[in-house]
Amino acid sequence: MKNGKFESALGTINIVLLCTISLVTLIPLYYVLALSFTDPTEYLVKGGQLLFPDKLSLASYKYLLSTATFKNATFVSIGISLIGTLVSLAVTSTLAYGLSRKRLLGRKIMLRIILFTLLFNPGIIPNYILVKDLHLINNYAALILPVLTSGWYVILMKSFFDNIPPELEEAAMLEGCTDITVFTKIVLPLSLASIAAFGLFYAVSYWNSFFNAVLYINDPKKWTLQVLLRNMIIDSSTSTAGGAVSMESAETPPAETLKMAAVILATIPILIVYPFLQKHFDKGVMLGSVKG
């Protein structure tokens, strides 16, 4: 009986604690969403923190989507996310598959080199010098090549490939298949869960790319959405030099509602993609961590 009461009390405490954490997390998100839909006139009249606006409006969203700067930054972020994710998955999967084959010459040395990168990082200045010497400043490649793959992701995907029965590869080889055919026709179809999981990781990373964009991209016309959003939030007037969204017109919505609308628009793409990959996500992560 005592154990039953203790477990019941513990369950109640857990529920209360989780609900409290959920509210702490959701209230700021709700505030951002509510303010982004607040009618500009109501905001100017009432001001302050509007958690329950009387009148909803799409004025802030319409204004942002009508500006060339915001649309250009959105297309840049989408392009970098798509291309970067595809290239990173190709590099990570091929490298991991090669390292999972014990007949690969120099396999142990390559694994040690990859593990070394997990322990030691060259730092910001050497990375910047390397990118500059490669003439990648103000080049979109600077947002992809320095983070093309991750040693940790390679190790996890290698663990997944290790779990694929070698008999499948041997049978394919007897049928005359090459290594490339085995990888593309057998291994990849069996690895969709893992590919989906790491694809989501890479997509989120590229979409949220901010620090590298600030370091390597100086041309405002090549800003990513995150950099543009950062300049909008930092500048109280949301009018930054060199091409940010201008708020000087009297017909434009208030700066605060525009900022919140920009935050929502920057979040929506990942929220749309995640449900389609969710069924593969948990399975892919777990399978990649079963065997080290």
Image: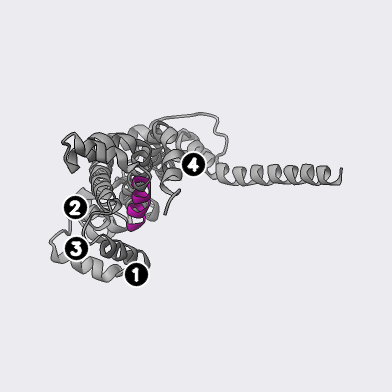
Q: Position of residue 199 (x, y in %)?
A: 33, 42
- Relative depth, front residue between 103 and 280: 103
Q: Badge 3 is on which residue?
A: 131
Residue numbers of the magenta segment: 151-161
Q: CA distance from mark 1 to mark 2?
A: 24 Å
- Relative depth, front residue between 251 and 106: 106
Q: Which mark is residue 141?
A: 2
Q: Position of residue 133 (x, y in %)?
A: 14, 66
Label 3: few (<14), some (14–19) or many (≥20) C-alpha neighbours in 10 Å: some
Q: Which mark is residue 32?
A: 4
Q: Position of residue 228 (x, y in %)?
A: 31, 49
Amino acid tagged 4: Val
Q: Which mark is residue 120?
A: 1
Is residue 217 rendered magenta in the image? no
* Above or below, comparing residue 132 to residue 28 in the picture: below
Q: CA distance from mark 3 to mark 2?
A: 10 Å
